[in-house]
Image (cartoon, rainbow, N blue to C red):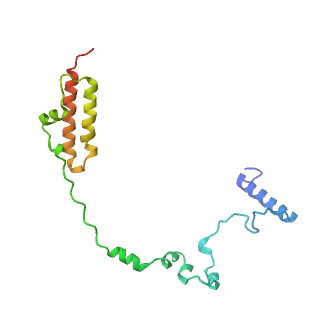
Amino acid sequence: MLFGQSVFQSVLERLKAEDKTDEDAGARAAHRVPGLGTGLAFDVMAFDVMALDVMEGVSAGSQRVGQAYFDNLDLDAAAAIAEEPAAAPPPEPVMPDHLARIAPEEIAAELAIAAADIQQTLNEKRRAFAKANHPDGVAELFRDNANRRMMIANLLIDEAMRRLPHS
């Protein structure tokens, strides 16, 4: 606090003093509106609604707070939208054929792991299989099958990598 006033109060006093000196000198800035020294903050609820009665083209509903929206609302269109029949539910998704094959022998045949495969080819097979079978890429109903297929494929590929000669 400066001289018994807070910083905010001292700034307000200085601004009031500057406004008085501007008025006395008659040198107002072109962008300032006389009488609006505090900005455009005002109480909307305290606005004089009765003064709007003299304006032409203003409906009585728009003079009340919150009623202007309802003047522009087309109730017939809103009723027509509400009366539209609900769309038919989407059809149940059909499980792809490859997700039905969950036996380890079938997945091994799809992977076609050979003794000549090296680590690079095994990694490529893993990525290609995951791209086609990852649980995040299928419908919710088929995620269990996709998850099972991914686990079996990963086990088969990991086992093939363990059998690779270490260099």
Decide: is 17 above or below 78.
above
- Left or right: 34, with 53 as reference point: right
Please give the name of the residue rendered at 13% of the width and 34% of the height, measured from the top-left corner: 104
- Give the residue at the far top of this rendering: 167
| Count of residue discs | 0
> Does 65 appear above or below 144?
below
Residue 35 or residue 100, whichever sits in front = 100
Q: Nearer the viewer, residue 44 or 137?
A: 137
Within the image, what quadrant is residue 113 found in? Answer: top left
**Quadrant in which the C terminus appears:** top left
Residue at 37% in and 77% down: 79
Question: Residue, x 12% and y 37% (percent of image)?
Answer: 103
* Rendering coords of residue 73 (x, y %): 46, 77
In the rendered view, would you say 166 is above or below 128? above
* Image-quadrant location for residue 134: top left
Q: Residue at x 44, y 78 (%)?
A: 74
Looking at the picture, how far across and down is residue 54, in whole percent?
64, 85
| Residue 100: percent from left, percent from top | 15, 44
Residue 26 screen position, x and y as percent? 86, 65
Furthest-right residue in this view:
25
